[in-house]
Amino acid sequence: MSPTEAAVPTATAVPPVAEASNGLSKKLHGRAFYESIGSPKHIVAPMVDQSEFAWRMLTRSFLPPDQRTSVLAYSPMLHARLFVDSPRYREQHFEAIKEDSGLRGEATSTPNETGEQQNGGDSANGTGVGTDNGLRPFLDGNPAIDRPLFVQFCANDADALLSAARRVAPYCDAVDLNLGCPQGIARKGHYGAFLQEEPELIAKLIHTLHENLDVPVTAKIRLLDTPEASLQYARTVLAAGASILTVHGRRREQKGHMTGIADWTMLRYLRENLPKETVLFANGNVLEHGDVERCLAATGFDGVMSAEGLLSNPGLFSPPPPPSVSAPEPESSAPAVADPEYYWHTPDPRREYWTSSRPGSRRGGWRIDAVMRRYLDILHVYCLGEAAPPARKPLFIVGDPVEWLKEEEPEQSNTNGAGPKGAENGEPARKKRKQDNHTNGNGNGSATPAQPIPKEIFNSPNFVAVQAHLFHLLRHAVGKHHDIRDRLARTRKADMAGYERILAMLEKRVGQALLAGEDKAFEAEYEAGTDTEVEPEIVDDPNSSAAAIRRCKRPWWVVQPILRPMPAEALAKGAIQLKKKAKAELEKETKEADKNDDTTKEAEAAVVV
């Protein structure tokens, strides 16, 4: 009988703990496994092409060195069948090992006897690191810097899923099955949330890994229409052998303009009706650091997973730094040879973290120029194998020399209406933009031909993701400074020199804003919109995003989430057109929310009387 023909347990069965097939140790399951990796409560969500090694490292960099392993991270979602069938796909999506000779900028995999790439493991179990074949840990799942790590796959075929999982098992702590993706590509590919009508297939996929894989299997799901249906769904996944269950507090239909609020109440229902030893992660509604503890308290779950929140603020899991603290001077310079176990950013909160001057305010946040610096540093040192990041001047704070902020910039880098004739909002003229598309966008007005980029770097998942990450991180900045937006749009993938020029532009804009007192103007505007010095209690309003926008708003140079309008707001503005059934459901939810609000007000009035 093949592995996928093994009997699949019912929803009420308790899965056995499988022993590791390699004979090294007994595979842990459930809470025992969770405790073995440190019981992390902060989790970086799996995101397609967005939760790659460099971004995971960036998220961990905001924590003290002894706390960085407390963040559990997931790989980007990988397609199981493509991972098995295509060496090129593996090479471009998973960089676990590389040749021991040379710097990290060189090839990250070597051909095996059949000519296939060994990156990600091409033997049946993917082993080979630390043996005489000259391979060593590289980025993904490197025990020194990238653990704990779960690798996520989407799949609808148990054999393909098992084969893919075996290739990554030596380089991760668990393999996760994506049952939550709601996008159209998941519908077309028959995976993710579009398997939820097929509980037997889901159970087969999970049980196959549970019985035949050397590391635990976990799963990520979305809610169904009712608490009872969601509970039965969770029980099915857990009975099949999932050691940890992540639940996104939204239904499959809640995406885009229909995203709305995640239902923490239903998550609490699951917690109260599943066995206490079940390990649960909550996903949804985490916009700021304080929302992590709010979510844990509201749901009773073990951990909180964040996706879009971390794209806007990779320091979301880190508490605000102590006030008026600066980093000590480094004891020595960076090593002469690049070593991923050596380099970590040393923060200087005075220059990197903005704090509101408003009395009693808890608002603050990392400066986007500081975050972008960290991100590029990680790419330089870990992904390119450089001994140290480029030397740069300290980030500007008021009181520093200002001469460099007043220097004129080349024409095509000007902003705020200072561009060439015919430009608007500081954008270069159309003809000049068109011409610049054929150069390397060097920012000094010269047409320097683009330099070739090595294929292994150009195709690395860490460089494929850079432009999207920067557009997300700098969303509020590029809306104001269009020259930075245009430069970022024109910068080629993996062009680190181009990204450094964008960073220099950004640092100068932030310095100019601070020098001009824009932070004080922001505070005055914020105070004008409130009638109390005490910040109100946080309440998630399903009908309006106004309160969330206000509490998350920061100056444009400070990290802050990108907030969608609530479905009711989008509908009122004509941004979406609902079908009759969906419209009726939305109206019903709105009426129930208003009714609950009225009941609460009546109760409060009765207490006052």
Image: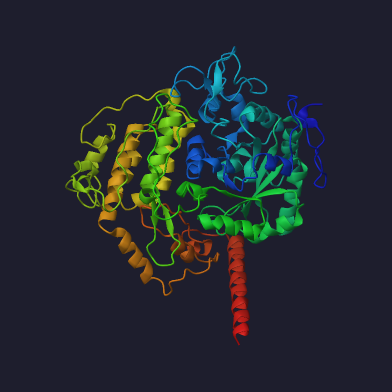
Snapshot quadrant of residue 179: top right
Residue depicted at x 72% and y 37% = 205
Q: Is residue 492 above or below residue 540?
A: above
Snapshot quadrant of residue 394: top left
Q: Quadrant of the N terminus?
A: top right
Residue depicted at x 24% and y 29% = 448
Where residue 379 appears, as percent x and y from the top left, is: 42, 33
Where residue 286 appears, as percent x and y from the top left, is: 54, 55
Residue nearer the viewer, 438 or 542: 542
Where residue 96 appears, as percent x and y from the top left, is: 55, 27
Snapshot quadrant of residue 582: bottom right
Residue 454 shows up from this direction: yes
Q: Is residue 71 above or below residue 589?
A: above
Name the side, left or right, on which 296 lies relative to 13. left
Q: Seen from this angle, which residue lies furthest top?
A: 113
Where residue 142 appears, as percent x and y from the top left, is: 56, 30
What is the number of callouts on the image?
0
